[in-house]
Image: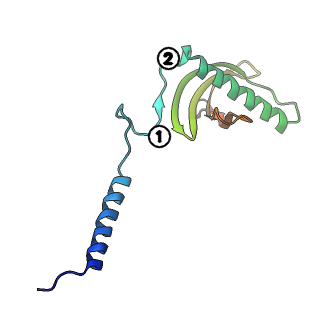
Amino acid sequence: MAKPSSSLLTLSSFLLIFFILALFSTTIQVNALGRKVGAREKIEDVKSNKEVQELGEYCVSEYNKSLRKKNNESGAPIIFTSVVEAEKQVVAGIKYYLKIKATTSTGVPKVYDAIVVVRPWVHTKPRQLLNFSPSPATK
């Protein structure tokens, strides 16, 4: 009976290690609290959460700035009321998904959806508004 060559053993060992690494790299990562890493997480007590309310004000302010730019300083701004729902997701920073209650220039209350990323280590622009639009339920 012939002995297997050492190159065949090396190849089969390499394939076994590759298979094991591939298997473990495709499993869902879970943190110590049992949550998926990178998954959205609901923020409780939104009304009393100062940071979330300040982010809501920031989103409305940035939206109003972009409206003024687009309309040559004549856009009617909306007025921030409060953040009514919020979720966060750990990405390269923290991405917040906010439902913001605001009042239009005609006094009509509306709900808007905003997405903002906070990256405190970026000194030039630590917060960035990615999206701001009327919530589908209130269009």
The residue singled out by tag 1 in the image is 38
- Amino acid type, label 2: Asp
Helix, strand or loop at label 2? It is loop
> Tags 2 and 1 in contact by the CB under 8 Å rule?
no
**80 versus 15 height, above or below:** above
Query: Quick one: label 2, few (<14), some, or many (20+) residues within 10 Å?
Result: few
Nearer to us of marks 2 and 1 is 1
Relative image position of residue 124 (x, y in whole percent):
74, 36
Indicate left or right for 111 with 28 as reference.
right
Relative image position of residue 105 (x, y in whole percent):
77, 22
Relative image position of residue 21 (x, y in whole percent):
35, 58
The residue singled out by tag 2 in the image is 45
Q: Which badge, 2 or 1, comes first in the chain's sequence?
A: 1
Helix, strand or loop at label 1? It is loop
- Amino acid type, label 1: Gly
Q: Is residue 109 visible?
A: no
Q: Quadrant of residue 54?
A: top right
Q: Is residue 91 visible?
A: yes
Judge by depth and name the residue closer to the eye, 28 or 24: 24
Relative image position of residue 28 (x, y in whole percent):
37, 46
Question: In this figure, which colouring scheme has been used for the structure?
Answer: rainbow
Q: Which residue, as the protein is rendered here, is positioned at the far left?
A: 1
Judge by depth and name the residue closer to the eye, 112 or 49: 49
**8 versus 22 height, above or below:** below
Q: Residue at x 32, y 68 (%)?
A: 14
